[in-house]
Amino acid sequence: MKNFRANGDSIQPIAGVGGVVGGSIIAIVSLVGIVVADAAEGEAYTLQLKGAFSDVPKATGESWAVGDKLYLKADGTSLTKTATNNTFAGYAYATAQSADTIGSILLAN
């Protein structure tokens, strides 16, 4: 079957200007994922679209409860509970305190 894809958990886009850093969370339009490994500009890389990830950048000043909806900020810097002007990314799978700079997400692609 020509259109069969063995794994829908990731995609292999081409890195844009400046490349990508492994472990970072990024959005490609409305797909949000975690970069598996560094890639230079113009190279293909793996963007993991499903799974649970810890140590992702979190907006300070807000606490998270398990199950809270999380959004990637429009500037791509961190995750937040604020939906306005941001891209839905998934759900908190662990609590996080207001002062925390990292959190845990279950991606929802």
Image (spheres, grey):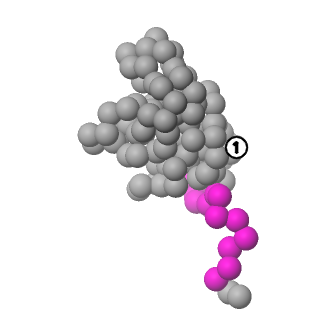
Q: Residue furthest top?
A: 99
Which residue is rendered at x = 38% and y = 46% of the image? 87
Which residue is rendered at x = 53% and y = 23% of the image? 95
Indicate the quadrant where residue 73 lies.
top left
Question: Mark 1: few, some, or many residues within 10 Å (few <14, many ≥20)?
Answer: few
Judged from the image, the secondary structure of the residue bearing numbered disc 1 is: loop
Indicate the quadrant where residue 34 lies.
top right
Q: Residue furthest bottom?
A: 1
Indicate the quadrant where residue 59 lies.
top left
Indicate the position of residue 23 as horizontal and vertical percent values: 64, 37
Q: Is residue 4 magenta?
A: yes
Indicate the position of residue 94 as horizontal and vertical percent values: 57, 27
Q: Look at the image and give the residue range highlighted in magenta.
A: 3-17
Judge by depth and name the residue closer to the eye, 109 or 74: 109
Q: Is residue 17 visible?
A: no
Our reading of the magenta stretch's main secondary structure is loop
Which residue is rendered at x = 40% and y = 31% of the image? 80
Indicate the position of residue 21 as horizontal and vertical percent values: 61, 38
Position above or below: 21 against 63: below
In the image, is 92 to the left or to the right of 80?
A: right
Which residue is rendered at x = 64% and y = 83% of the image? 3
Quadrant holding the N terminus: bottom right
**How many numbered markers are drawn?**
1
Judge by depth and name the residue closer to the eye, 106 or 75: 106
Judge by depth and name the residue closer to the eye, 48 or 65: 65
The residue pinned by badge 1 equals: 37
Q: Is residue 66 magenta?
A: no
Q: Is residue 32 visible?
A: yes
Judge by depth and name the residue closer to the eye, 40 or 79: 79
Specify the amino acid type for callout 1.
Ala
